Amino acid sequence: MNASAIIRISSAILIASAVWDSISTRPRARRMTCSPPMRTFYLIRHGETDWNRQEIMQGHTNIPLNETGLAQARRLSSLVLSLGVDMAISSDLDRAHQTALAALPFLEVAKDPRLREIHLGEAEGVPRGELEARFGAELMKKWYFSEAAAAAAEEVRLPGGESHSEARVRLHRCIVEWVNKYPGQRLAFVTHGMIMRLLAQHTTGQFRPEYRAPNCSVFEFCIERETLKLRQIFHLSD
C-alpha cells in the first residue's frame, strides 16, 4: 500500500470518528426505559379546544381542536418520535384523532371509542363555574375527590354520566387488549385528561397535582407481570 492510500484511509477514519463523537454527545430526551418482560405504552392528552379555553365541560361532546391545539400537537411530534412509538390508537372524538394525526404523522392511527373521555351526562356543555349551581355543592365535592374521599368517589357520577370506576375500567381494558394484541410494539394512546388522571391515581394510589395534565401531556406506563405502573410524565416545554 502506497503512502497516499494510507493517508486517505487515515483521514476517513478520523472523519468517521468525529461524526460518531458528534452523534453520541447530542442531547437526548430524558427517558426511563422498561426492560423485558415489561411492556411500555404512552397515554397522550389531546390538544386544546375552545371549550378547554372557556372551561366548558366536554366529556363525549365532539369538539375539535382550535389553532392552539393543532400547534401543540405538531410540537409534540418530536417528543413522541424520540420515545420510539411503533403504533398509535386514538379516541374516536375529533380532538383526540386530530392530535394523533398531527403529532404522529409518520404512523397510521387506529380509532377506539373506549379511549373517550369520561361521560359527563347532563354536565356536558356546562361551564365549570356553573356546576355547583346546577348539580349541588355536595355532589361536585365528591366528583372532584380528594385522597380522603377516594373510595366513595369511585362510584359517584354526574346525572346521566359514567362513574369514575366505569370510565377507568373501560380505559384499562382497552389498553390491555391492544398491548396484548401487539406485544412487541410500543403503543401510544391519544385520549383525554380526566380519564388519564383517573388511571394514574388508581395506579399509584396517590392524588398528585401533576396528574391534572395540561393539553398534550404524555404519561409513560409499564405493564410488568400484569401490574400497571406509572413511570413518568412529559409536558410540552413552554
Image (cartoon, grey):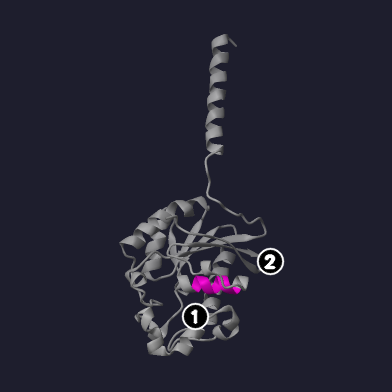
Query: Which of 123/177 is in front?
Result: 123
Of helix, strand and loop, which one carries label 1?
Answer: loop
For the N terminus, which image quadrant?
top right
Counting from the top left corner in percent of width and height, residue 142 is at: 51, 85
- Count neighbours of disc 1 (C-alpha within 10 A) and say few if under 14, some if 14 to 19, many if 20 or more: few
Magenta includes 199? Answer: yes
Query: Which of 142/79 is in front?
Result: 142
- Count neighbours of disc 2 (C-alpha within 10 A) and say few if under 14, some if 14 to 19, many if 20 or more: few
Q: Which residues are magenta?
A: 195-202
183 sits to left or right of 95: right
Give above or below for 154 relative to 19.
below
Query: Which of 106/18 is in front?
Result: 18
Q: Are marks 1 and 2 in contact (CB under 8 Å)?
A: no
Counting from the top left corner in percent of width and height, residue 168 is at: 54, 76
Q: Quadrant of residue 186?
A: bottom right
Q: Is residue 115 visible?
A: no
Secondary structure mostly seen in magenta is helix
* Residue found 47% across the figure and 62% down from its top: 217
Which one is closest to the eye, mark 1 or mark 2?
1
Q: Is residue 207 visible?
A: yes
Residue linked to disc 2: 225
Magenta includes 84? Answer: no
What is the tally of numbered marks visible in this picture?
2
* Residue found 52% across the figure and 66% down from its top: 210
Q: Amino acid under label 1?
A: Tyr
Residue linked to disc 1: 144
For the C terminus, which image quadrant?
bottom left
Separation of marks 1 and 2 at Cα, in angstroms = 32 Å
Q: Amino acid under label 2?
A: Arg
Give above or below for 139 relative to 76.
below
